[in-house]
Amino acid sequence: MTHAPFVLDADNGADLHRIVIVGGGAGGLHLATRLAGTVGRRRVAEIVLVDRYPTHFWKPLLHEAASGHRDPANYHIEYAAQAKRHGFRFVQGALESVDRSACMATIGAVHDEDGAEMLPQRRVRYDSLVLSVGSVTNFFNVPGAALHALPLESVEHAEVFRRRFLAACTRANHGLETAGMRSMPAINISVIGAGATGVELAAALTHAVDQLSVYRFQALDPKRDVRIRLIEGGTRVLPALDERVSARTDAALRRLKVDVVTGASVAEVRADSLVTGSGDALASDITVWAAGVAGPAILNSLDGIALNAANRVIVTDKLQTPGDPRIFAFGDCAACPSATSSGFLPPRAQVAHQQAMYLGKAFAQRLAGKAVAGFAFRDAGTVVSLGKSGATYQTGGVSSRVLIVDGAAASGLYRLLYRKHLFGVSGMRHAVLEGLGQWLGRWSRPAIKLH
């Protein structure tokens, strides 16, 4: 027997303007927290945050989770605790559909690890619906890529990679201990895509191998037995940044013994290798795809909502969908027009952060009956981490006037970005205490996860 979905409604907030935010990433969580402290506190609106997961982990740190340098369990934010602390409502579940005529969003059921249903399918009424569902890996229909290449979109993906990486190191170390012969690298890891994610992961893995060889795998020579290959279809790493940044980063990666391969497209991914566009077969025990993103498939089901070629929701400069002003989208899932070019703003964390700040003010103005100006992005620059080898920072603005900082100064800026995120979602006092606890905890644990 099929039951109608449960309709979720607040006990005493049905008469308030309800803002439902779908997606608790860096932008969505920040917006929910900010709105709860302004229009929510003044009882002008009710804020509801929806996410399929119970906890939040800052996505730019996924490469550190994948390499084992950062345990997500010590760096996540529980949505339910955040909701109680700041005064919004959290609903767990994935968005399944939107009924625009009835202003209802359908949230899917939640199941436990054994497949048993914990929460049923529900319907959530909204007055304003904000889509902040992030992005998914775009495999560009490359044969075998979706089947054999690992994405890096979530903590679960990072953990899958980390476990495979550890298993490969364990097998290789045992083989070297028993056989003792070295004729070729024992482990081949391929990272496809030399944007920020690919570069950061490749660098982090070189440091991970060094540390694992000290703790567990003494027979494994990090430089000789493990090949980390970074493959880029363009002519240089970090193709979106200044050529000087690319050159410095390329040199730093090569010093770390990363095999940097540029100008090489990937024609096929196999279980134990990949084939380049020129027909070369490259051994690959583990392949990671970091070569592009697209909007999640759920966006295709939203009738009347226009999408661009990358499956991102097309929005106006006020982050509203042209076909329905009650629906907003921002962050990676939104195609927001760029004020400086004919295209759209890139899917970057700082874009989502600035859009969350903008929407926080815009909703307050809109609910007060005031005029709302359009969103204007201000490029604060880009910082790319190379792990213990430092980082590189490029300021925003005209390329001919770009300021490039690397080394310890850039590493400090990189760490500051995470602290800034914590300040925005947790407040100064809580963020400082949490940061202190994390810092103290790192002194009592190994530098890398060993199991």
Image: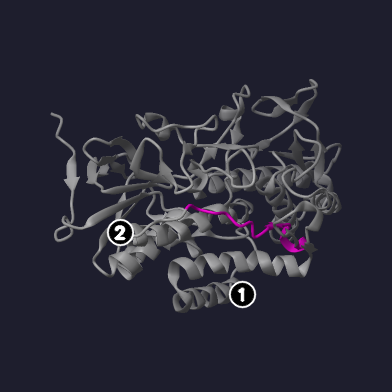
Above-or-below relation of 2 to 124: above
**Which is more N-terminal, label 2 or label 1?**
2
Of helix, strand and loop, which one carries label 1?
A: helix
Q: Based on the picture, tell me whether residue 385 belongs to the magenta stretch.
A: yes
Looking at the picture, does residue 52 appear above or below residue 78? above
Q: CA distance from mark 1 to mark 2?
A: 52 Å
Left of 331 or right of it: where is 196?
right
- Callout in the foreground (1, 2): 2
Q: Residue at x 53, y 44 (%)?
A: 153
Q: Is residue 120 visible?
A: no
Q: Residue at x 60, y 43 (%)?
A: 164
- Location of residue 218 (image quadrant): bottom right
- Asked if the stretch drawn in magenta spans residue 72, the answer is no
Q: Quadrant of residue 184?
A: top right
Identified by mark 2, the residue type is Gly
Q: Position of residue 248 (x, y in %)?
A: 84, 54
Describe residue 435's horizontal placement relative to residue 23 as left or right: right
Residue 41 visible at all: yes
* Dot 2: element: loop
Q: What numbered label is drawn on residue 369?
A: 2
Quadrant holding the N terminus: top left
Q: Residues within 10 Å of mark 1 (few under 14, many from 20)?
A: few
Q: Quadrant of the C terminus?
A: bottom right
Residue at the spot 33% in from the left edge and 61% down from the top edge: 80
Q: Nearer the viewer, residue 341 or 66?
A: 341
Picture coordinates of residue 303 (x, y %)?
34, 29
**Residue under circle 1?**
443
Which residue range is magenta in the image? 374-390
Q: Amino acid at mark 1?
A: Trp
Nearest the camera: 130 or 151?
A: 130
Q: Which mark is residue 246?
A: none
Residue situated in front as seen by the camera: 440 or 242: 242
